[in-house]
Image (tube, rainbow, N blue to C red):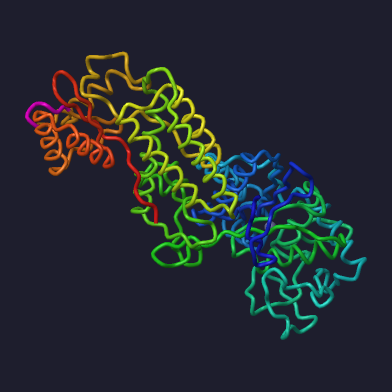
Amino acid sequence: MIRFFNTLSGKKEEFVPLIPGEVKLYTCGPTVYDYAHIGNFRAYVFEDLLKRFLLFMGFRVKHVMNITDIDDKTIRGANAQGVDLKTYTQKYIDAFSRDVDTLNIIRADVYPRATEHIPEMVAVIQLLIQKGYAYEKDGSYYFSIARFPDYGRLSKISLEELQPGQRVDVDEYEKENVHDFALWKAKKEGEPFWETEIGPGRPGWHIECSAMSSKYLGETFDIHCGGVDNIFPHHENEIAQSEAAFGKKFVNTWLHCHHLIRDGEKMSKSKGNTITIPEIRKVKDKPEALRFLLLSTHYRKTLNFTFEALDQAEIALKRINAFAGEMKYGNFPEGETEAVVKIVEEAEIKCRAGLSDDLNISKTMTAVFDLIKRCNILLCQKEIKSGDAGRLNGFLDGVNSVLGVISPTHITAWSDMKADRTVTPGITVEQLEKIMETGKARADLKGAIVGQASVSGDLQVLSKEQKEKIEMREKARAQKNFAESDRIRAELAAEGILLEDTKDGVRWKSVPVQKKPE
Ligand SMILES: [Zn+2]
């Protein structure tokens, strides 16, 4: 059973789409008056996680995301630069598309632009006029919220102090300012306008989502998403417009993503603390780590962006990638291990249960890291067989179809790989040689231990304690105290250091280990 927290009811509810096997999803898109910042992209990545999860669960998903290319802000921006609206917004639409691809977000089926749907908006406004929900004043049209008793149900605002007939003309306003809102704004000096059946002018912001969602998804559809900022007034107004015009329920499930903050403050243009994806990439060019950071905090919790958090995300992701690489490129003996079958089964159930519980990503990641930890120990004990690796690859592919962040890297390289040029697909001999040179690849413990290198170049060197443990184990082995030597080997394995005894001595390599998620 899939459960989502529905903002409309204020609780978790079982999710059942209108048409079995099919989900109609509308997500409010960017207002293209400036470059989108990662606060905006947190919501888009959350929506992508939602969509990928639904696809993973076997639903067909029709996804529509609008592009607001006309509103107060875009007009102001274009006028300030002295260019026409289309030229002005196109630059930001292109940048938005690049960022969507950078973050590995699956593109929507349709990205309707407001300026290309003026007749559809006028038609909805005409319905509202006919049904008595809209009135005209000086060539502009307003929605009369006193006529719509359900107004405020989504945002839970109180309408007690509402004064009928008071109007707001701006597209965005605060809760203290609940008024009749503009559906259509009369032609004005310095603003683009359209000649229409309701007179010359241009649409308000909110009407576009009612018009375009009904055009592409129908008058009632399954899921509508946005950031919490959209709840009031935007989504409240969408509900009022659509339900008044079409006389039926607009949306069954509303999901809203919480804020991204930076240094304790909400990221927003007005605070001047925004950062864009290209700006982040100048500091750290790891888009997959950024995506992982954005999706690894539950969408209904505030996410604090720092570069340290991005580093942490990168480290966690490296652990997954290294394990995935080991499974993909490693050589294993034929066969299958009972334990792995069980580990994968358990992890699959937990991952599914986590995401089905209102996209509880923490539960899912705990299951993934737990699997990696347990399998690393089996790796160390040489218990992983080719059938297991195949099974684990399948599991990771499934996980990645939802997370979209895993790219297997074979980061561990035995010290003698330089001689053995056949190993590790994906790494060139040149790369390997460079690693070996820079690598301190040969650790210095009595000449017995050789080292480990990683493709990314950031070598992990054994800690003093780990070296001592290896020495102690060597002593135990020399004394034929195998219980003790096995105990130390398991202890090191839990720390991510795998040992292999060869005729030339013991070799080690570092593998990813689980870091306890909070
Ligand atoms: Zn919208």
Relative image position of residue 207 (x, y in whole percent): 76, 60
Measuring 75% from the left and 71% from the top, which residue is drawn there? 181
Residue sitting farthest toward the left: 446
The C terminus, quarter of image: bottom left
The answer to whether any part of residue 345 appears in the image is: yes
How many numbered circles does the render carry?
0
Q: Main secondary structure of the magenta part?
A: loop
Relative image position of residue 315 (x, y in whole percent): 34, 44
Relative image position of residue 235 (x, y in whole percent): 69, 63
**Of the pair 423 and 484, the residue shown nearer to us:** 484
Horizontally, is 143 left or right of 271 in the view? Answer: right
Relative image position of residue 267 (x, y in whole percent): 48, 62
Picture quadrant of residue 248? bottom right
Residue 388 belongs to the span the image colors magenta: no
Q: Is residue 385 above or below residue 266?
A: above
Residue sitting farthest toward the right: 130
Measuring 47% from the left and 52% from the top, which residue is drawn there? 362
Q: What range is drawn magenta here?
A: 445-450
Q: Is residue 356 above or below residue 256?
A: above
Picture quadrant of residue 52? top right
**The image quadrant in which ligand 1 is located:** bottom right
Horizontally, is 482 left or right of 225 in the view? Answer: left
**Of the pair 502 and 49, the residue shown nearer to us:** 502
Horizontally, is 484 left or right of 402 in the view? Answer: left
The answer to whether any part of residue 36 appears in the image is: no
Residue 447 belongs to the span the image colors magenta: yes
